[in-house]
Image (tube, helix red, strand yellow):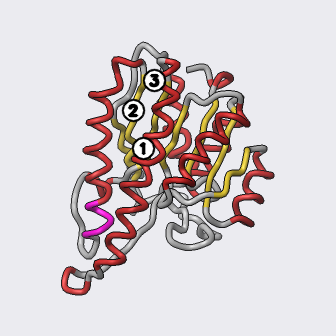
Amino acid sequence: MNLNECKAIITGGSKGIGFAVAKAVGAAGGQVAITARDASMLQGAARQIGAVAILGDVRNQEDCRRAVETAYEKLGGLNVLVNNAASGYRSPLESIEDERFLDLLNTNVLGPVRMAREAVRIFKRQEYGSIVNISSTSGLRGSENSSAYVASKFALRGMTQCWQAELRRHNIRVILVNPSEVQTGFGSKTAPSMPNPKKLLAEDIAHTVVACLTLNDRGFVPEVTVYATNPW
């Protein structure tokens, strides 16, 4: 894809990896719409990078439908969806709360389903598009006290493989990106003020997403994992 032709919607785009991807795509000449639940943070982020701001919650089907329709209208088309919005929840097994577990799955698993379900109708109609699912190395292996988050990322990886099997014949690329630990302040409002120079930044994941998108459309990257070289 030539990013000058990119018209992308990015969920969770007001901070962290989503914001970094939106900024990178915009800097490369693409048009971007970002979604988030926090109105003030969303508006500030959109102003900063010249993106279209769409208030919405991926846990809500109507919000997802409206977000995709609005992006299509405001951008004059749509050919990229980046499913980035996610939440975290840590708990030892004996203390897991059903409600919090299900809420996380609603965001991290059904959120991407809802957004992709809406976007793929457009992509199939035009026989072209790309879906980028931001997962995690937690989708590759389990870890202590992380049952809910790990389960959601294993599910996202499996769904990505299903979508690849379904959509390649329609010239739709589905790409899974597995970042290792990224210094984004995940679960809080702000990233660290003094990031560790040896660990990953959101910009590193944005670079990866842009690289995958700019590959000639005759090929695609099914899955890519990004680790810090020497974080110790």
Residue 175, by quadrant, is top left
Question: Gap in Å between the C-alphas at discs 2 and 3?
Answer: 13 Å
Tell me what residue is drawn at x 64 percent, y 44 percent: 22
Tell me what residue is drawn at x 62 percent, y 40 percent: 69
Amino acid type shown at disc 3:
Lys
Query: Which is in the foreground here, disc 1 or disc 3?
Result: 3
Residue 116's place in the image compared with 231, above or below, is above
Query: How far from the left and from the top, in percent, is residue 205?
Result: 50, 46
- Residue beneath label 3, please? 124
Dots 1 and 2: beta carbons under 8 Å?
A: yes
Query: How far from the left and from the top, in percent, is residue 79?
Result: 56, 28
Amino acid type shown at disc 1:
Asn
Tell me what residue is drawn at x 40 percent, y 43 percent: 177
Label 1: few (<14), some (14–19) or many (≥20) C-alpha neighbours in 10 Å: many
Residue range corresponding to the magenta coloring: 147-151
- Residue beneath label 1, please? 133
Q: Indicate left or right for 113 with 4 as reference.
A: left
**Closest to the observer: 209 or 157?**
157
Query: How far from the left and from the top, in percent, is residue 163?
Result: 32, 34
Dot 1: element? strand
Determine which of the numbered discs, if any, sits on residue 109 in the image. Answer: none
Residue 99's place in the image compared with 69, above or below, is below
**Closest to the observer: 137 or 42?**
42
- Residue beneath label 2, please? 174
Question: Gap in Å between the C-alphas at discs 1 and 3?
Answer: 18 Å
Label 3: few (<14), some (14–19) or many (≥20) C-alpha neighbours in 10 Å: some
Q: Earlier in the sequence, mark 1 or mark 2?
A: 1
